[in-house]
Amino acid sequence: MSSSVGVGSAGGGGTDIASLLEKAKELDQLKKDQDDIVVEINKIHKKVLASPEMVDKSVDAILLKLRGLYARAKELSENEISASNALIGLLDGLLQSGASTAQKKKIEVGEQKKKRIKSDTDSARFSAASMRNQLDQAASLKGEQVAARVKSDDEKDEWFVVKVIHFDKETKEYEVLDEEPGDDEESTQKYERKYKLPMSYIIPFPKKGDPSSAPDFGQGRQVLAVYPGTTALYRATVASHRKRKSDDYILEFDDDEEDGSLPQRAVPFYRVVALPEGHRQ
């Protein structure tokens, strides 16, 4: 009749767990006490069966003892029922608390999932809006002069000043016009070349009439700039600090040595752009 009650971890508070353990110990003790009573009762039964004549001599004493043992057994049994009911109540409370915690966790996970979906949706909308904005800005460059990478090979990139003729939002390509002087410098004739270039091959120039919107490249910064007297752009280094954003840049162009030194050349701010990453010259 002996038993042992084990209690694992539960999702309730420390007080509930402590009460549960106390009731479990109480139930174990009640069962042990009942086992002891049953042993005593069985001993008397065996004596009576083995020596019936003994009953005749001390029947009252034996019956009184048996009655006391059975009364105690009944009391312990009732206490066991009470302790068991108390344990069931505590377990129900802990289970309900655990279910509430699980439900709360489920709700939190659901909310997090909703937020993540919303965030992904917002990001997608932002990306789409950002792309539309880029396409609109690209289309607005029609008729403007821009810096364009018109040639590229394994060794170097060639950048020239070109005019935007059209931008196709579907293919995301510019159609540009490169105006080059003829071989005869005295000739006023110009040879025009058209190119179709991706968006990454085009860099808008700063607005000539709006110096405040132009980037400000500090001394020592490498840039891409139009070489004076040409329509070609080359890598150069800012040689000195400008006082105003409308001032010309003083630049030293790479591979522009004269008498063993690099001459400093003035270039308008609206003909200077950031050096593209990975530029080869």
Image (cartoon, rainbow, N blue to C red):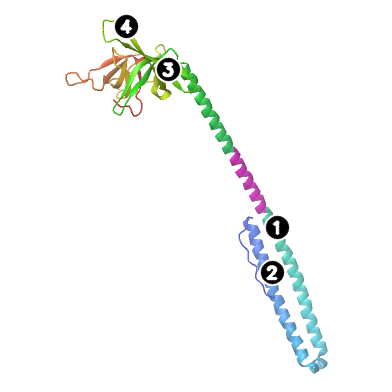
Circle 2 sits in a helix, a strand or a loop, which is it? Answer: helix
* Residue under pointer 1: 92
Measured in 3D between alpha carbons, the distance from the residue under mark 4 to the one under mark 3, in whole angstroms, is 22 Å
Three-letter amino acid code at the position of disc 3 = Glu
Q: The residue under label 1 is which amino acid type?
A: Asp
Give the residue at mark 2.
27
Count neighbours of disc 3 (C-alpha within 10 A) and say few if under 14, some if 14 to 19, many if 20 or more.
Answer: some
Q: Is residue 198 above or below residue 187?
A: below
Camera-side residue of 98 and 161: 161
Q: Which numbered mark, 3 or 1, is in the foreground of this view?
A: 3
Q: Tell which circle, 4 or 2, labels the residue nearer the N-terminal end.
A: 2
Mark whose residue sits in front, 3 or 2: 3
For label 4, the residue is 189
In which quadrant is the N terminus drawn? Answer: bottom right
**Chain-order first, disc 3 or disc 2:** 2
Q: Amino acid at mark 4?
A: Gln
Main SS, magenta region, reads helix
